[in-house]
Structure formats: C-alpha cells, structure tokens
C-alpha cells in the first residue's frame, strides 16, 4: 500500500513513518509544505521505499493519506489537498488541545471534532484515530496499546483499522462513527495530563472487548 503522511516531517509523522519502515509493508511518501524538507526527512528515515514531496503532490497515487500536521493547520491543509486527494481515505490523527497555564491540557471547546470539520471540506471519506498513541511510544517499538479508530465510511474504516492494527502491540478497535472523534481527540488532553502528572508515557488499553483481534 502507498501511504502519504501530510506533515510527515513532524514528531508524529516521523514516528509513524519510522514504524512503517520497520514493518516494511508499505511505500511511504512524506508530505510537507516544503518539498526539500520532505525529501530530507525521507533520507533521514532511510529505506528505499520512503520518498518526500509537497503535501499536495504526496497524495497523488496514495491508497491512504494520514493527516498529521499541527492541529491548527489541519483544516487549511485538508482544504489545500482536497482536489488531488479525490476520494482517497483520509486518516486524521489531529487533536486540537489547549494548554491552560497552571491547570493543564483542555480538550478543544468546539462542539465538532476536527475530523468532522475536515470531512466537511473534502469529498474523501475521513476516518480518525491513533490520538492516544504518543509519537515517543511509536518511534521505538510497536507500543503495547490499543488503537481506537472511528469513521462513517465502512470501507475506509476497515482500511484504517488494518493499518492501525499493524502499528500497535494491542488491537485496533472500531470506536464507531466519525462523531466519536470528539471523544478520541479529547482523550489526547487526558493522556498529556496523565503524562505530566505521573511523568509517564501513558497509552490506552480497553478491557472487556472479547472477540477483537
Ligand atoms: N506528537 C504526538 O505524540 C501525537 C500523538 C497523536 C496525535 N498527534 C497529532 O499529530 C499531529 C502532529 O503532531 P506533531 O507533534 O507531529 O506536530 P508538529 O511536529 O508540531 O508538526 C507536524 C508538522 O505540521 C506541519 N505544520 C506546522 N504548521 C503548519 C501550517 N501552518 N500549515 C501546514 N503544515 C504545518 C509541519 O510540517 P512542514 O513544516 O514540513 O510543512 C510539521 O512538521 C497533531 O495534529 C497532533 O494532534 C500527535
């Protein structure tokens, strides 16, 4: 499969690309606003199956596109790639969390998730997930965590679940419709608060789900 990672030059995009390189199943295109930065990141990641391009060019020919830019750039980036993206599934990992000094991380106050707002901008089916998986946990090994994925399009969600399942030591679990991204994106704030409070590398494991692989 050909996977394009928009914002693949950042912490999460690099960690994701590194894990995919280690797995060796996929061709990876690092996307960036700057083609040279993308190509440089691809070289640093190594492997003959990693290339770099602008975000707009990266989506061409991809089977799955991961939206891994900074959260406040997610809507503009989705708008910019909407044309070349067409109907290729778009996997949003972005969470618009806010830091409140002296208090901690807050979830996005917007009633809709970023993923739902992205869906309003593109014809492609949007899925969302991996919000609870820290880049630092992903870059070293398959993290011993479950990956929660949501979306409205059944085929796109199946693709995203299979993709997410390769990345983690736990299971990729179907968390329901794209509206569940409101909770999943908010979970990022919870994870960051746990990490700050306990100097930890927290992740999520769901109990009581029988029959999930
Ligand atoms: N870090 C984590 O542990 C983690 C975990 C789960 C989910 N996420 C989500 O993953 C996404 C990326 O997180 P990150 O920590 O990797 O962020 P990051 O390193 O700060 O930024 C990622 C990339 O976003 C691009 N970018 C920044 N400003 C932009 C703009 N104005 N327009 C377009 N692109 C812009 C940059 O790429 P170029 O400059 O090369 O264009 C940058 O390398 C976020 O939405 C976050 O919520 C992060």
Image (cartoon, rainbow, N blue to C red):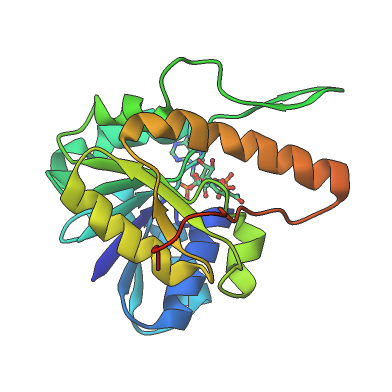
Q: Is residue 139 above or below residue 160?
A: below
Tell me if residue 95 can be seen. Answer: no
Quarter of the picture containing the C terminus is bottom left
Q: Is residue 184 above or below residue 44?
A: above
Q: Quadrant of residue 60?
A: bottom left
x and y, in percent, of residue 15 in the image: 55, 64
Q: Is residue 147 above or below residue 187?
A: below
Tell me if residue 19 can be seen. Answer: yes
- Front in this rendered view, residue 205 or 140: 205
x and y, in percent, of residue 26 in the image: 31, 75
- Front in this rendered view, residue 201 or 33: 201
Quarter of the picture containing the N terminus is bottom left
Residue at 61%, 53% in the rendered image: 204
Q: Is residue 188 left or right of residue 211?
A: right
x and y, in percent, of residue 165 in the image: 41, 66
Residue at 53%, 74% in the rendered image: 44
Q: Is residue 146 left or right of residue 67?
A: right
Q: Is residue 66 left or right of residue 17?
A: left
Q: Is residue 172 left or right of residue 91?
A: right
x and y, in percent, of residue 19 in the image: 49, 72
Residue at 49%, 66% in the rendered image: 41
Q: Is residue 147 above or below residue 153?
A: below
The mark tally for this picture is 0
- Front in this rendered view, residue 50 or 33: 50
Residue at 44%, 60% in the rendered image: 210
């Amino acid at each position: 499969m050909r996977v394009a990672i928009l914002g693949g030059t950042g912490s999460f995009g690099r960690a994701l690309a590194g894990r995919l390189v280690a797995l060796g199943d996929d061709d990876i295109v690092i996307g960036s606003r700057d083609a040279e930065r993308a190509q440089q990141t691809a070289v640093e990641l190594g492997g003959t199956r990693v290339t770099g391009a602008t975000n707009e060019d990266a989506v061409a020919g991809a089977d799955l596109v991961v939206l891994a830019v900074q959260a406040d750039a997610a809507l503009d980036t989705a708008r910019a790639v909407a044309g070349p993206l067409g109907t290729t599934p778009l996997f949003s990992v972005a969470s618009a969390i806010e830091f409140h000094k002296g208090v901690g991380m807050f979830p996005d106050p917007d009633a809709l998730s970023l993923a739902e707002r992205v869906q309003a901008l593109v014809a492609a089916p949007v899925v969302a997930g991996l919000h609870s998986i820290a880049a630092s946990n992903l870059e070293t090994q398959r993290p011993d965590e479950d990956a929660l994925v949501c979306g409205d399009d059944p085929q796109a969600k199946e693709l995203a679940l299979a993709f997410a399942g390769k990345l983690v030591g736990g299971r990729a679990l179907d968390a329901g419709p794209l509206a569940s991204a409101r909770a999943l994106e908010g979970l990022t704030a919870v994870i960051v608060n746990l990490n700050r409070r306990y100097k930890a590398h927290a992740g999520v494991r769901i109990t009581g789900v029988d029959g999930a692989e």
